[in-house]
Image: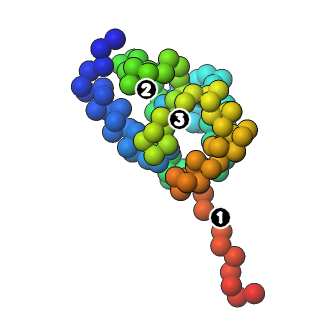
Amino acid sequence: MFLSTEIKKAIEDAIESAPVVLFMKGTPEFPKCGFSRATIGLLGNQGVDPAKFAAYNVLEDPELREGIKEFSEWPTIPQLYVNKEFIGGCDVITSMARSGELADLLEEARALVPEEEETKDN
């Protein structure tokens, strides 16, 4: 498939829309495949701040679904980007979560829900 200028621009705009971007099948509330569901679960367990997260349902747009694979040179979906950098699919993300690399990456990207600061009144 030829990656059209419009699709390439749409993908670049999507990747720039938030520190953490997931191209997935379905939505975070209603994932349409087990790998997308697992990836959403991992990101939730890591404490990703919803305000710093964007998800794109590739099932809504066949050009996007094929285009993202060509753009990243990665054959499967879901695909995770952090700070505009392609990280990988479900297997890579699962491995990174187990090793602690994902937590470090998300913390470095300042994409986690801020921990409540303890009050200094005590």
Q: Please tell me which of labels 3 and 1 falls first in the chain.
A: 3
* Residue at 72 percent of width and 40 percent of height: 99
At label 3, the amino acid type is Ile
* Residue at 70 percent of width and 45 percent of height: 100
* Residue at 48 percent of width and 21 percent of height: 74
Asked whether the viewer can see residue 65, the reply is: no
Pointer 2: what residue? 72
- Against 83, residue 113 (above or below) is below
Asked whether the viewer can see residue 112, the reply is: yes
Q: Secondary structure at mark 1?
A: loop
Q: Are marks 3 and 2 in contact (CB under 8 Å)?
A: no
Q: Secondary structure at mark 2?
A: helix
Residue mark closest to the camera, 3 vs 1 = 3
Q: Quadrant of residue 121?
A: bottom right
Q: How is the image coloured?
A: rainbow
Q: Position of residue 106 (x, y in %)?
A: 58, 49
- Against 116, residue 68 (above or below) is above
Spot the residue most to the right.
Answer: 122
Q: Quadrant of residue 70?
A: top left
Pointer 1: what residue? 115
Pointer 3: what residue? 87
Spot the residue most to the bottom.
Answer: 121
Q: Please tell me which of labels 3 and 2 falls first in the chain.
A: 2
* Residue at 48 percent of width and 34 percent of height: 86
Q: Secondary structure at mark 3?
A: strand
Q: Quadrant of residue 102?
A: top right
- Distance from Cα at disc 3 to Cα at disc 2: 10 Å
Pointer 1 local density, CA inside 10 Å: few below 14, some 14–19, many at least 20: few
Residue mark closest to the camera, 1 vs 2 = 2
Q: Please tell me which of labels 1 and 2 falls first in the chain.
A: 2
Q: Are marks 3 and 1 in contact (CB under 8 Å)?
A: no
